[in-house]
Amino acid sequence: MQVYPRESSRLKSAEAIVRENFPQFGVNKKQEIIRLLYEISKREGIEPEDILKEEESLQDYLRLKKILLQRRYPLAYQDQPSLKTYLPKFKFQAHPLNSDLAKNKKFYPRKVFIEKSVISSGLATRFKGFFPKADFEEIESFQAYRVKNKDFGIGAYNKRQETVFIVRENYDFFKKCPCTKCASACGYHIFNLGFGCIYECTYCYLQEYTNTPGIILPANIGDFFNAFNAYKREGMRIGSGEFTDSLALDRWTGYSLELIDFFKQHPQVTFEFKTKSIEIDNLLKTKHAGNIVVSWSLNPQAVIDENEFFSSSLEERLAAAKKCVAAGYRVGFHFDPIIYFSGWQSGYAWLIEALFAGIEPKDIAWISLGTLRFRPELKTVIENRFPENKILDEELLLGYDNKLRYSDKIRYGVYSYMISAIRGYSNDIELYLCMENKKMRGELSL
């Protein structure tokens, strides 16, 4: 599959303009001007040659860059002329995801590798029963497989749902939430049950780990439980869903049944399932101790359609949450990442209205708020996998933690709006910011 023709043509036009009009610029300067021409062209929906008129005769690099920066970041430039931008060299590869096909894809792995030590595990047996047409192969270990199979890039990552590794986890059972530097700590703990997700979200940070050749599922959940007895803290909040979706594969893994049963023994600990799925059948057929929270990531349907391929619709997520409430669960919601776009206020206002139309505030354990942010290196991965994405068209700058974020002014406006809208329904729901700096937290009234 080739890079989408429109974006390939856009890039070639930008390169030609710089080559013809600014031959005296060095390699890095040419790279930055090409990047700015491309991004302005894509953002405004025009051709690169329509951007430069009088500026084509402008041979001063700093003045030219300033003009282009003002046009690329019009809102941010008004407040902070000295912008911390990230303008990397293009690394287009011919492996974009075909998002038109992605919406209806069903999970059915073609290849399942099982570590020798867990070949007789319940998880391995379940997968053999659920996927009789899959090719099953015993391996000595996942690490040994990685050593022998090093060539793994974006093209293979796009097909990762076709490969599953059933392993024995020996080390990374739990960890504290990896809060970004200088951010307000949330006190969350991660139950590290698996790695890799079957959904295709344009913004997902897991894309940066393109050396992971499939979905990794531990078969030894009992060892997690044994280790937890030494790890637990009274009153702690812990959950899965950091490195994979908590429930997307639950009908096949059956993890939730074992987790709910285990945490009956730890009533002072709250366990959270985080998901974009509607795989709640196991939750509805088992009894829990009231310390389980089922949480959904929420975005307006337009954002889901453009950025969260394979995942359940907003309507389906809210309907699943309502069923869990009826079964006695508390539910949580994560407006994270909040995507800034033209008309975002009306989109999120409608979403909040839909949420409270179906869920009573008393049944909501918490709501988190977090705007889009990611490591700079992810930018070129997104461009390669989703060349026609819209999320990179907005004004993303290097923030306080060196991640690409919206400006402080935009983030403050987004949070203020969301907090006000939610508080219009309840003043008692616990609200918290995810991966935000202490200064922003101090300026907002949650």
Image (cartoon, grey):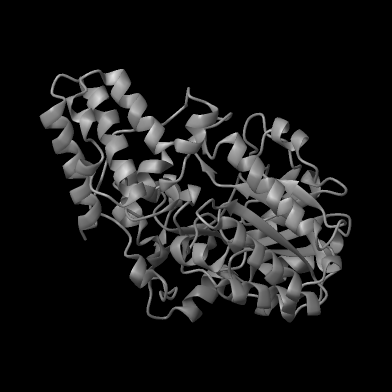
Is residue 297 shown left or right of residue 428? left
Residue at coordinates 27% horizontally, 20% vertically from top-left? 61
Is residue 283 shown left or right of residue 364? left
Q: Is residue 83 above or below residue 242?
A: above
Taking depth in this image into account, of 137 and 62 the one nearest to the observer is 62
Q: Is residue 119 above or below residue 174?
A: below
Q: Total of numbered circles in the picture?
A: 0
Taking depth in this image into account, of 330 and 79 the one nearest to the observer is 79
Residue at coordinates 59% horizontally, 76% vertically from top-left? 251
Is residue 91 shown left or right of residue 71? left
Residue at coordinates 32% horizontally, 47% vertically from top-left? 148
Q: Is residue 6 above or below residue 436?
A: below
Taking depth in this image into account, of 302 and 111 the one nearest to the observer is 302
| Figure quadrant of the N terminus | bottom left
Taking depth in this image into account, of 437 and 13 the one nearest to the observer is 13
Whole-percent x, y for residue 30 in the image? 23, 27
Whole-percent x, y for residue 395 in the image? 47, 40
Whole-percent x, y for residue 224 in the image? 69, 54
> Which quadrant of the view contains residue 325?
bottom right
Residue at coordinates 14% horizontally, 28% vertically from top-left? 21
